[in-house]
C-alpha cells in the first residue's frame, strides 16, 4: 500500500492509518493530542546541519535532495526500522514544512518506496 503524506497541522483522518512524524523537532504550536501520532522517527529526518543549511530555500532543493539521500543511505538501521513499521500497513508520513512539493517527507517516501524523486 502506498505511503500517504500529510502536513502535521492538517487534522488526522481515519484513513491515515499509522501516523509517523518525520521531523527532528516537534512542530510549533501542535499538541500531542492534535497530532494523533503513532510514531516519531527523528533518526531518519534530515540532520540538524542539513536542515539549517537548506532552510527551505528553493534554490537549494536539488542539492538538498542529493545530500538527504546520502544521509538516508548512511542510515540503514533507521531505514530498515521505518520500512518494517509500514510494511503491509496503511501509513501516513507526517511533516511540518509548509511546501507540499519541497520537503523531506516527500523524499523519504520516495526513498522507502524505491522511487527516484
Image (tube, rainbow, N blue to C red):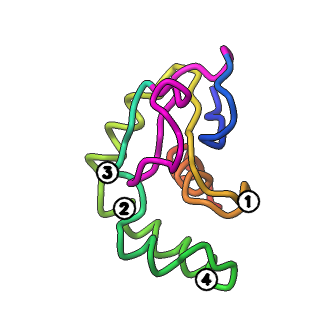
Q: Which residue is mark 1?
A: 101
Q: Position of residue 116 (x, y in %)?
A: 62, 60
Q: Which mark is residue 73?
A: 2
The residue mark sitting in front, 2 or 3, is: 3
Measure the alpha-carbon separation of dots 1 and 3. 22 Å
Q: Residue at 39% of width from left, 60% of height from top?
A: 72
Q: Position of residue 110 (x, y in %)?
A: 59, 51
Q: Nearer the viewer, residue 113 or 43?
A: 43
**SS class, disc 4:** helix
> Where is mark 3, residue-wise?
43
Location of the C terminus (image quadrant): bottom right
At horizontal 53% and vertical 31% (from top left) the residue drawn is 35
Distance from disc 1 to disc 4, alpha carbons, whole Å, reads 14 Å
The tag earlier along the polypeptide, 3 or 4, is: 3
- Report the span colored magenta: 14-37
Relative to 14, say whether 73 is above or below.
below
Is 20 located above or below residue 52 in the figure? above
Amino acid at each position: 500500500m502506498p505511503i500517504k503524506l500529510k502536513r502535521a497541522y492538517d487534522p488526522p483522518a481515519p484513513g491515515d492509518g499509522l501516523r509517523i512524524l518525520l521531523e527532528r523537532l516537534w512542530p510549533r504550536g501542535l499538541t500531542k493530542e492534535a497530532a494523533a501520532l503513532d510514531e516519531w522517527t527523528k533518526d531518519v529526518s534530515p540532520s540538524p546541519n542539513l536542515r539549517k543549511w537548506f532552510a527551505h530555500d528553493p534554490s537549494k532543493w536539488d542539492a538538498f535532495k542529493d545530500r538527504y539521500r546520502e544521509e538516508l543511505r548512511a542510515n540503514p538501521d533507521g531505514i530498515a526500522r521505518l520500512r518494517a513499521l509500514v510494511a503491509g500497513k496503511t501509513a501516513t508520513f507526517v511533516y511540518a514544512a509548509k511546501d507540499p512539493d519541497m520537503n523531506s517527507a516527500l523524499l523519504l517516501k520516495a526513498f522507502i518506496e524505491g522511487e527516484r524523486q
